[in-house]
Image (cartoon, rainbow, N blue to C red):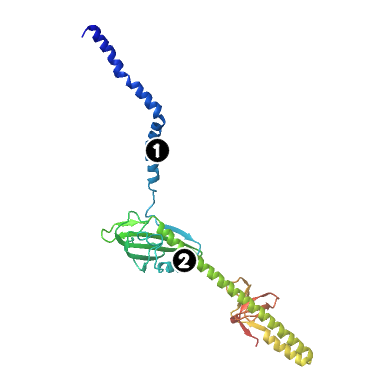
Amino acid sequence: MSRRGRAASSSAAPAITNQPAPALRDFVRRRFPATTALFILFLWVIPTSYGREHKQKKEDFGLGYSTEISAPESEVLEAVRAVVNDGMIEGSREYNKDKYIEKAGSVSSCSLFPAWDGPGTVFFKVREQVLAPTNFKESNDEGTLAVRYIVQSKDASRTILRIDAVFVEDFRRNSHPSNGSVESAEYRNIQDRVDAIQLDKKQNLDAERHRQEELARQSLERQKELEEAAALTAAEGSSDNLEQHVQNLRHQLERIIKAPGGELKSAPFRSATTLKPLPAGSDVVILVVTEYWYGVETEDGQHGWIHHSQLEPLP
């Protein structure tokens, strides 16, 4: 080939090989700019959002549950005994079949918990042969589910309650702590029972108070009738008869404080405020009569209540 031909060939070759590249780039830019950007955004966003949505929530296992209940120790103990013997463990399920785990029983001791050497009363509720209960860390296989309750008195009106739950596999003996669901559910059950006990006690006190008030009202009406009848009889009789009626009425209405003395109360209850002590041998006049208490007036004109066991008739 001549020099001219070779020059022509060499000058033409770049034109032939480079011609498609700009055209292809222009074609891609014209047809796929938005699609390419969306595809890149999709590849970046999906893994990020997927990771956020599928990241497991961090839970605290094995912390137990401790709280203060506004009730005396006796009421909390009564509620805990009822829950320990109700046959259920709430806050967990067996393979998500039921709302709670049944066939649990009360036991006097449980080796699944460390020995408790602190103050208070300890209870245990146990269910054996449980299949992988929920709300226990990485629980699997079959094992024993146990709940421990510790009741401690803080003062006359407040009580400390602690609840712990654990699941232990039968075969490998692996221990799985609770995430708090069982403890909080059992606490709610106990608190509901404490509320019911307090409500029942309040209703009984109200009923007894109403009964005492009704007895006092009836007694006062009978006393007025006796006084009116005595006054009418005295007016119709002679002075001797009148004096005799007065004496009879005095024996009916007056009493003497027994030794070693009594207490004048503000209401017909032993827990009522003491208005003042009454010395033995002092006289009181009965104004109201109830089954156990008398409404009286003292020698100095003060009114109050005294238990009938602290009085004796005039000689």
Question: Depth check: 185 or 25 in front?
Answer: 25
Question: Depth check: 123 or 307 in front?
Answer: 123
Q: Position of residue 193 (x, y in %)?
A: 48, 66
Give the number of the mark in front: 2 or 1. 1
- Name above or below for residue 86 compared with residue 224: above
Q: Are marks 2 and 1 in contact (CB under 8 Å)?
A: no
Q: Position of residue 263 (x, y in %)?
A: 61, 75
Q: Secondary structure at mark 1?
A: helix
Side of 205 where 100 appears, left or right: left
Report the residue at 48% width, 63% height from top: 191
Query: Amino acid type of disc 1?
Result: Val
- Name above or below for residue 86 compared with residue 175: below
Q: Quadrant of residue 148?
A: bottom left
| Quadrant occupied by the C terminus | bottom right
Query: As drawn, which residue projects farthest toward the left?
Result: 1
Say whether residue 174 is visible: yes
Classify mark 2: residues with Cα within 10 Å, few (<14), some (14-19) or many (20+): many
Query: Amino acid type of disc 2?
Result: Val
Q: Secondary structure at mark 2?
A: helix
Q: Position of residue 87 (x, y in %)?
A: 39, 68
Q: Please report whichever mark, 2 or 1, sits nearer to the chain's N-terminal start.
A: 1
Question: Depth check: 215 or 51 in front?
Answer: 51
Cα–Cα span, label 2 and label 1: 54 Å
Report the residue at 72% width, 84% height from top: 227
Q: Which mark is residue 76?
A: 2
Say whether residue 278 is visible: no
Numbered marks: total: 2
Classify mark 1: residues with Cα within 10 Å, few (<14), some (14-19) or many (20+): few
Q: Which mark is residue 45?
A: 1
Query: As drawn, which residue projects farthest toward the top?
Result: 3
